[in-house]
Amino acid sequence: MTAEIISNYKSLASNIGQLIEVSGYRNDFIARKIGIQPQTFSVKKGRKSFTVDEIEKIIKIIDNEEVEDYMMLEILRSRKDDDNLTDDEFNTLMGWK
């Protein structure tokens, strides 16, 4: 279970740029909301070097249906060898439980 949580976080952190793009929010808007300069935000996004706290703030800002759909698609792709994903598993993976 712990290894899966860490793996999910690593996946989230490495795909945060794509999640931002899917969300429809502009980089400068998110940067201001999390309290950093837009130029710094762009560098961190390009280097995938956001801190855990920054990632948490970003996720809270960009949380919308498009992002959830994208995340679900990525989960399904990563679990392509599994036949089924139960509601409980999905809710746990999405952090809703």
Image (spheres, helix red, strand yellow):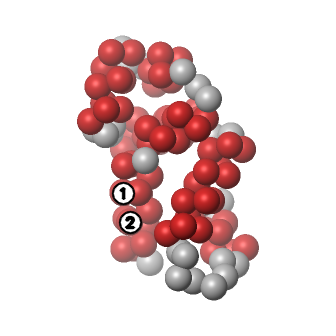
Looking at the rendering, which quadrant does residue 50 occupy? top left
Q: Is residue 46 visible?
A: yes
Identify the residue shown where x is 61% and y is 35%: 23
Q: Quadrant of the C terminus?
A: bottom right
Q: Count residues near mark 2 (Cα–Cα under 10 Å), then give few for <14, some for 14-19, many for 20+.
A: few
Query: Label 1 amino acid?
Result: Lys
- Please, which residue is most extreme toward the bottom here? 83
Query: Label 2 amino acid?
Result: Ser
Across the whole image, how many numbered discs are drawn on residues?
Answer: 2
Callout 2 secondary element: helix
Residue identifier under label 2? 7
Identify the residue shown where x is 39% and y is 15%: 38
Q: Marks 1 and 2: CB-CB under 8 Å? A: yes
Can you give x and y, in whole percent of width and height, for residue 60 in the image? Answer: 57, 38
Q: Closer to the camera, 28 or 74?
A: 74
Relative placement, left or right, of 29 versus 86 is: left
Can you give x and y, in whole percent of width and height, for residue 26 in the image? Answer: 54, 21
Q: Is residue 33 visible?
A: no
Looking at the rendering, which quadrant does residue 2 occupy? bottom left
Residue 82 position (above or below residue 73): below
Identify the residue shown where x is 57% and y is 83%: 82
Can you give x and y, in whole percent of width and height, for residue 29 in the image? Answer: 53, 17
Callout 1 secondary element: helix
Q: Count residues near mark 1 (Cα–Cα under 10 Å), then give few for <14, some for 14-19, many for 20+.
A: few
CA distance for labels 1 and 2: 5 Å
Relative placement, left or right, of 80 versus 10 is: right
Looking at the rendering, which quadrant does residue 3 occupy? bottom left
Which disc is residue 10 wearing? Answer: 1
Q: Quadrant of the N terminus?
A: bottom left
Residue 44 position (above or below residue 4): above
Identify the residue shown where x is 63% and y is 85%: 83
Which disc is residue 50 wearing? Answer: none
